[in-house]
Amino acid sequence: MSVHGISSLEPAYRQQSAGVSVLAETPAMTLPPPLWEQLVRNGSIGDEDLPSPMSPEKNWYTRRLRPARPLVQVLAEPDLRAVVLIRGPGPSVRVADLAASDRVITVPLDAENWREPVLDPIEQHPAGAELAERLNGGGQVVVVFDGLDQVPGPDHRLDLAHRIAAFTEQYRQARVIVTTRPVGYEHSRARAALKTAGFAHFTLLGPAELPRERWAEAVLTLAGQWPVGELTRQDKVELLGGLARHLREELGGNHIDDTALDEYVGAFLRERLGLTADVATGMLQHLGDGDVILTGFGAGVYGFTHPELLDHLAAEEFRKQLSDDDLVALCDWHGDDPDWAMTLQLLIGRVPGPLAARCISTLLTDDQPWRDNLNLLPYRLVLALRAVGELRDPSVVEDQAEALAQTLMALLTTASARERRLAHPLSFVMTTPRLTLGPAWPGGDLFESWYVDERPDLGYYAGLVAAHIHVALLPGDVETLRAAAQAEDWFVGRAAVEALATQWPQHPQTLAFLHEVTGSGPDGLVGEVAVRFVAANWPEHPDTLEFLRGAAIGSAHERVRQAALETLATGWAGQPGTLTLLQDRATDDENSLVRQSAVRAIATGWPDRLDTLPLLRDRARHDKNNYVRYAAVGNIIEGWGEHPDTPSFLKKCIVADRGDEVVLVSLRALVEDPANLPWLHDQARNGRSFNRDFVVDAISARWPEDPGTIALLWERATGKSDAEARLVAIAELAAGHAHHPQTVTLLRNLAGADADPSVRKSLEEALSGPQQQS
């Protein structure tokens, strides 16, 4: 049956349910800034839909701790009556076939039919009698509003979100599911409206990354499945190759808006094949219909379903179309850009040896900027190192090998002395993905000689990177890697376990060996990585779940317990006992890092359970470790910031907590709402003495022109507070309010009257600044 936008009123079949999983909450979409601006200009999204920057720490925990759960299980939970499913790239999932009900109403949303009266009082609908019977009758009814992103413009999507929320409130026996693509939804008013109405949010997981040996085959297969009869498979491969180059070269990533995509495809068809523009329209209509090679991300944004195929195709296009000199110039121009790294790595590995040597030479001709600026990571050096691993015959770069090894050794020596600023971020860049060099790498002997001499003096993160390179230079057979995994140097053992699990997952003894080494090494350095690879490579093995539970509770090493808990939360969230185990570890584990990981995992994976918020509040107030309390408060702010009791809870934290981190994160949340200013002003005057500076800083940073802020700063600058507090207030007045004549007069009066010489000196400097001189 299909009447007025309702495409189905039929029994649902769950044959597609196997293997479909979701993550809690919405994904963070990364698009090039010009594309975000274009989407705002053309009205696809509003200014408020633009994403805010995510801290590296938050992004790392978001990706690492968010559990994957079976979609069927989520849709069957009785507490989740209203759900938003964010659809990522890859095959379409027919939600109606997964809903745990024998009665499903699917309402497709698009630019044409979203205004139809299916959301108006049900009696007005042409199929009203049947709909009313289903919605008001006994048993569970599922209503799927499919494709919110297809509704044009943020205002219309907001209007529809309010109508869906009202519909959900009216028909409380129905389960309501809304589907949407991610772009333009994460920070939108429509999301806020549905969140306020109680909709839980989940993201459908995209397709798994394709193994590199299947990339060429995948392009041919997926291109062949793109249903456009006028084009041969080879025509489509050529079009996709040109598009990949265009995306990488002109747009800087894997995203293009529909207008630009339509123009590109139309021009290709006209210029290369002599076809008309209507063929391009037909091609684009099929994007997102099944497992095709391009997919939609919402708000008219498209890209490759598998981003790795963009790098594969772009590298091949550059190889075929650019001259040798242009290829070298391309490596030189983009060698510092991590977004280009895989494309250039593949490209260098596919060109003749002498040309590859020229490309690597140009990557090594920089002035090593990381020596002077620790914010500049050595992307060119890392690219050169990975590119050598692509070569069939590494001896062709023998002349470059010594320079590469020398630069690498200088980098690690510098990084060892600057652990946090350089070595820590370097450890992610150098080891993910794992290096593949082999004993034939021409610079290996030089590096190994240096490693033997310098290893004892390297810092933690620099030692991890050096060990990673050392293992990458070993023969890659099972026996060699097993021996290295049991070496006295636990950094080498850690890198060898990773290599063994990556290169030999099918070997009959690998899994048993990883179980065996879980207890190895001081602080669990080897066991931690063994646990993570057991979970990643053998999730279906009958012993894996019990192995992880045992490690989470019984390991003597906190790193191993932490890794086991995180992998259970991300891979076995739906298993009975997983949440209970996490709750137990969040309160009872003796190590604060383990408790902190458990708290984060519960908050990100089970935000809609009624017992999650009480647990977070308990940990925020009563855990003995400051950083566990900080993690709990931060997750309360992120997930329950709009809860009516959250402001009063944060005020209690500010008044009672002795940790700076807890106080600061609570202040930053409270100061955003002007309704909290009277309470904050009182805390600045009468609160705990060591909190007052924090409160004043937060208020003056967020509300510098508020009369209450200026009055507060004047009081502190002229009052009987300690000299340091007066200095802070004077600095705030001089920096933010020097344009007020009263401020200058105040500062001059204080300069001659304050009893503390350091305060008088600060006043003199403030009065001699450029703003006062002008």
Image (cartoon, rainbow, N blue to C red):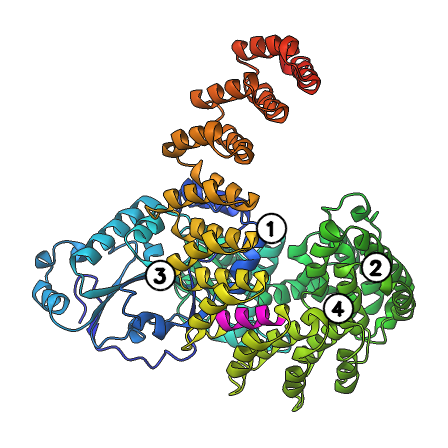
Q: Which residue is mark 2?
A: 408
Q: Are marks 2 and 1 in contact (CB under 8 Å)?
A: no
4 or 3: tag closer to the N-terminus = 4
Could you tell me residue 641's position as x and y percent?
Answer: 39, 47
Dot 3 and dot 1 residues touching (CB under 8 Å): no
- State which tag comes first along the sequence, 2 or 3: 2
Q: Amino acid at mark 4?
A: Gly
Query: In the rendered picture of this protein, how many numbered marks are placed on residues?
Result: 4
Can you give x and y, in whole percent of width and height, for residue 494 in the image?
72, 73
| Residue that extends furthest to the bottom in the rendered view of this protein | 508
Q: Which of these two is toward me, 13 or 738?
A: 738
For the residues labelled 1 and 4, the Cα–Cα distance comes to 23 Å
Q: Which mark is residue 732?
A: none
Residue 202 found in image quarter: bottom left
Residues under labels 2 and 3: Cα distance? 48 Å
Q: Point out the stretch of residues depicted in magenta.
A: 560-570
Measure the C-alpha gap from mark 2 to mark 1: 32 Å
State yes or no: residue 726 in magenta: no
Vertical position of residue 234 compared to residue 33: above or below: below
Q: Which mark is residue 608?
A: 3
Label 1 vs label 4, nearer the camera: 4
Name the mark on residue 349. Answer: 4
Q: CA distance from mark 4 to mark 3?
A: 48 Å
Q: CA distance from mark 3 to mark 1?
A: 42 Å
How packed mark 3 is, by other alpha carbons closer than 10 Å (few <14, some 14-19, many 20 or more), is some
The amino acid on which the numbered mark 1 sits, given as a three-letter code, is Glu
Quarter holding the C terminus is: top right
- According to the picture, the residue beneath numbered tag 1 turns out to be 250
Using the numbered discs, state the Cα–Cα distance from disc 2 to disc 4 in whole angstroms: 20 Å
